[in-house]
Image (cartoon, rainbow, N blue to C red):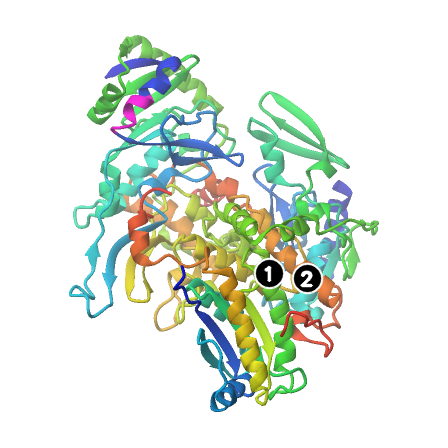
Amino acid sequence: MSDYTSKIKEISERLLKEEKVEIIIGFRKGTVPMMNEPCFVKTPEDVKELVWDSNCGINLANYLTGRKEKIAIIAKGCDSRNIVTHIIENKIKREQLLIIGVPCKGMIDKNKITSMFENEIMEVSEDKENITVKGEGFEKTLNKNDVLQENCKICVHRNPVIYDELAADLIDEQKVDRYEDVRKIEAMSPEEKWSYFDDLLSPCIRCYACRNACPLCYCPTCFVDESMPQWVGKSIDPVDTRTFHLLRAYHCAGRCTDCGACERACPMGIKVRLFTKKLEKDCLELYGWQAGLSLNERPPLDTYRPDDPEDFIK
Amino acid sequence: MKDWKPRIVGFLCNWCSYGAADLAGVSRMQYPPNVRVIRIPCSGRMSPKFILAAFMKGADGIWVSGCHPGDCHYMEGNYYARRKFALFKNLIEYMGIEPGRLHFSWISSAESTKFARVINEVTSAVKALGPRKHGIKTMPDELVKSKISMAK
Amino acid sequence: MRFITIDKNSWANGLENLYGNYRLFGPVKNNNQHFFKELAKGELPDFNYLNTRLSPKSLVFPQTEIMFEFSLDENDEQHHILKEINKDYSPRALIGIRPCDAASFMLVKRNFDTPEYKDNYWLHAYESTIFAGLACDNPCNTCFCTSAGCGPFHEDGLDLLLVDEGDKFIVKILTPKGDNFINSAGWETEADPTASEKIIAEMQIKAEEKIASSVSTDKLKNKSTIKLYDGTFWDDIAFACINCGTCTYVCPTCWCFDIQDEVTRNSGIRIRNWDSCMYPLFTLHGTGYNPRNTKMQRVRQRFMHKLKYYVDKYGDGIQCVGCGRCIRLCPVNIDIRKVCDIMNNYEG
């Protein structure tokens, strides 16, 4: 990963020196294991802060919304797809952006690794495919592929789809079954489904981290904050919580790139991607659509075909 | 339970299905009285929030009806609606609302017979499922009883 | 000061004795995380934990609390009258609360219990609760309690302190409430105060040595509020923030709430919910004007409140007990330790 970091620094420094951009959006080293902090860099001297490793799971497209200056942004596969979506939705202009693409081998799952050890983890380091976890009285090396974030495990767009510079050579894409978990739920009876999601959502504290971590959620007033009419109650009634999650997901229909930002952000470890993945699967099956791959195609809910499937309509 | 009558909310497009309801009425057609009709300007106006709000407040079934593809008063509202409905219906059924609670149809203002037929179908489908078991917002007085205010 | 020891073999038995007299709450493991929950009869608190994922503040200050009920039905004689709700304020015991979390109740009390205003909901719940603390001998790497006016064996806010000593607990009884609690459980093996004090002091030193991180707060009080407010570092700190409410919801010392009426058909309730200064809605005026419209302003408010305004108002330290939850759970790694140090050393 250190070669990624040095290449990113090199490109960033050049862009700033040549005044091609005013600001670089990237990551700096976090203060706790397995966390990096999104940051900006404005001078060539500060470029040294930038890092790249397997803890850069936050989707940086989230930090582009409405910005006015000329920006260089570091983008892995999913980030780049969300940048495409941002451009399509007029949240940023392509001309403003210099995209430093990072072919991504996946981000590691902090919750998963934490839950593997009884004791507190003090330090996590990585070397190619190996993740070394150290804590009081233990040290263990894990295979990175075993501890990837769920969305990274099944990622089929690891290379950036749009970029101006590259931080490393492009890598092979995976061929995987993306929807096994969704199919499992689809096969349940309505009653089972209902209680499955009741259990899934019961820890929710309505902090809205899932919504705010999502680069797609930029409405000036979110539906949960609307008061005339008030669509969703603000207490922790499970019906309100479920409605929030359902509508949050539906707002991402045809736009979600399964970057996993929502799930990563959840302080309670709820698998909120299960909602958006269902929509993603349907968009693919019904309309042959995958979000954020092209600047020239309209997203599925912003267009139609006269012969769209309608066997559910009487 | 014998006396239970389903409450169904029907969202009907002003330019077609709503007219069909009028025509069915003046033609003295018989159909079950369980649908409360809300007039909307176009099926494209239909927001998923309307459906969720009705379900949260206790509707047993919901029925949305608009113009046949190609007949939209606003040229393409129903084409957009069709995609929204497809994804939305799948999503709420995926989360545990029974198929048979949410219905869609295309009915032109001349199709009073189809209107009566669909309302029959919708009503009997919802009747077959019985009252909703989940997802209705708790009434305030029940919340008070359940002591939500104590520790979670 | 009275000390007793509880043989771990008689632990379950004592809790069983308490069960009828107190509602018992303790840490319980669920999905790899510990949470404070009401214990069912026979259920034991699980003490094998670093700290609970959420703070126990909700046991006294619930995330959603009903204040009044009312009817809008004009046939009802009492329509449009707000009516109090009967609540269960029978004695409760929080068993195994960490000293940092217990200390947080003392900070929060300053807000809910002032000479001018008393928040009866909070106060009643607080007064009906026994705080049975569990000394902390294995702190997390994000803990900085010792430099936040607190510590792994801190006694403020506790009625008794349990110290785990292998096959028994040494219990330091701190208040008459704690005394009643212990008597009601039937634990009565008296321990020698001097010897117990000595053992606890040794363990305390060891535990405090383990706390690896700290914040510097010594200069905050003398800093100019305006200079800190106008500090040049805020843009950098706030950049990553996504304005979720995680930090405030998991914080044991965040006390803000919002009051709402919820009406369904003809009946309604007035409820209060936790609110968060991270949300734009927190300060939105009825006119549409929002004095804290940008995320930098909101992030600044949170840290200025905890680390400057509070320090100035009460004069005895920061509004933080160093539990480290906001550091562990912030999705974008904004670290209060770093911010506190920047503020403390800022010479703008």
Residue A303 in magenta stretch = no
Q: Position of residue C139 (x, y in %)?
A: 47, 27
Residue A282's disc is 2
Residue B60's disc is none
Residue A165 higher or lower than B33, as above or below? above
Foreground residue, A24 or A103?
A103
Q: Is residue C106 left or right of residue C343?
A: left
| Residue contact between numbered discs 2 and 1, judged by CB atoms under 8 Å | yes
The residue that appears at 22% across and 44% down in the rendered structure is C113
Q: Position of residue A139 (x, y in %)?
A: 65, 24
For the question of whether residue C316 can be seen, the reply is: no
Q: Is residue C260 left or right of residue A92?
A: left
> Are labels 2 and 1 on one chain?
no
Residue B127 higher or lower than C304, as above or below? below
Task: Name which residue type carries label 2.
Answer: Asp
Residue C45 higher or lower than C251, as above or below? above
Location of mark 1 (residue): B91
Q: Position of residue C324 (x, y in %)?
A: 46, 37
Task: Name which residue type carries label 1.
Answer: Leu
Q: Magenta residues, as a range? A: C15-21
Q: Position of residue C219 (x, y in %)?
A: 38, 40
Chain of the residue on which disc 1 is drawn: B
- Tell me the quadrant of the picture where the C terminus of chain B can be found: top left
For the question of whether residue C290 can be seen, the reply is: yes
